[in-house]
Amino acid sequence: METDYDDYSHIAEEENDNHFSVLTESDIKLLQNNDINHISSILSISKATSSLLLSHYNWNITQVMESWFDNQQKVQKITGLSSNQSQIQQLGFPISSQIHTCDICFETFSKDDIKSSWCGHPFCIDCWNQYIDTNIDDRNCFELRCPQPSCNAAVDEDMIYQLASESRKIKYDRFLIRSYVETNKNRKLKWCPAPDCGYAIDYNLPDSSSRLNHDVRCLCYHSFCWNCGEEAHAPVDCETVAKWMGKISSDIVISTNTWIIANTKPCPNCKIPIQKNEGCHLMNCRLYYDAWKQIVEGRRILKWADVYGYNLPENENAKIEFFEHIKGMSQVALDKLQHSAETELGKELENGFDVVSVKKYTGVKRVSRETGDNSNQNRNTRRRSGIQV
């Protein structure tokens, strides 16, 4: 069977020197099918088996053939294939009995509703569907094995296409294409790194090429260097680019640190750099203010939580206990936060913290205490009313 590997009809673009080609998804699928048909013809095996072998050997045609002709039984054992090719080409092992028990759900089914790999372990169609769908979702679908524990029998793509759900078949096809591009040892394929671009680049130059320019251009107009992945940088070589990028990064860090030192001062409490370029010289640290705002918000939530708890039906004891447990944990966490904030604020007061900040924080502190007192009053009122919580 003759196969022309360069005969794909929708090549998007080629450079004048033909050192790369831009491939669409249909182009990739055509190349993949050509490889599968090629191995299937040479080894006289099914296309499903050919696909399984190529996937295992990272789509390296030469390695598949060398391994197969060197030790066919070893390859079959590694990949979970049967030595009986007639079994491989069947969907389900021929079972003589008309009624069978699924080895997963243990329900009985007719022969038509039971499927198996070449090993003969019987499973119902629903269990097969769930098993295959789950493995596709987990991206464990290229070397799928029989669900029977310790069984090494392969589940090939013929079984996947017949027993998987429609959405998982689409996902499987997508994974298969990605595998062909990302793990291919037979071709130099790479996805275009531009965001939301679905094209791939087929790089045609051998490793021994003395070419210094490895720039490629995708149909999305994104140009990049195939060799290092940076933006196109001809005529500069990749080593020089790497050194230049390292120097730029270092210079940016040094420049940024120099500017921060020259134009900012660290907050005496939280040490965050602050830039002061206008207005008076009085500065307030927002760290404390934000902390106290969070405390007030927490007290407000607890207050209305008490209202929620007050209106819970008395006969729903489980819900009441769970509510009290959650509210109690929240109360403990909020008390710890408030204690920490009061402790830190006390230290700043001892160190002569500015008057404006003290008034602001003291006001927030007072509100938080009043909110907490209101919450306690609501709780005490309910207890005095004799309602069990």
Image (cartoon, rainbow, N blue to C red):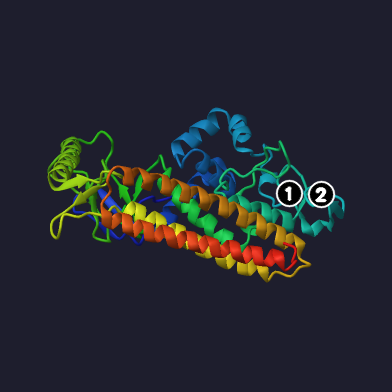
Residue at 55% across, 65% down: 374
Q: Is residue 327 above or below residue 254?
A: below
Q: Is residue 201 left or right of residue 120?
A: left
Q: Position of residue 269 (x, y in %)?
A: 30, 44
Q: Quadrant of residue 70?
A: top right
Element type at marker 1? Answer: loop
Amino acid at pointer 2: Ile
Element type at marker 2? Answer: loop
> Which of the two residues, 240 or 148, is positioned nearer the viewer here?
240
Q: Quadrant of residue 261?
A: top left
Mark nearer the viewer, 2 or 1: 1
> Which of the two residues, 148 or 1, is positioned nearer the viewer here?
148
Q: Position of residue 288 (x, y in %)?
A: 35, 52
Mark 2–mark 1 contact, CB under 8 Å? yes
Residue 1 seen in render:
no
Amino acid at pointer 1: Ser
Mark 2 or mark 1, earlier in chain: 2
Query: Which of the numbered marks, if any, corresponds to residue 95?
Result: 2
Mark 1 neighbour class, 10 Å CA radius: few under 14, some 14 to 19, many 20 or more: many
> Which of the two residues, 12 or 357, is positioned nearer the viewer here?
357
Q: Is residue 258 above or below residue 218?
A: above
Q: CA distance from mark 2 to mark 1?
A: 10 Å
Q: Is residue 84 left or right of residue 266?
A: right
> Which of the two residues, 73 or 331, is positioned nearer the viewer here?
331
Query: Which of the numbered marks, if any, corresponds to residue 116?
Result: 1
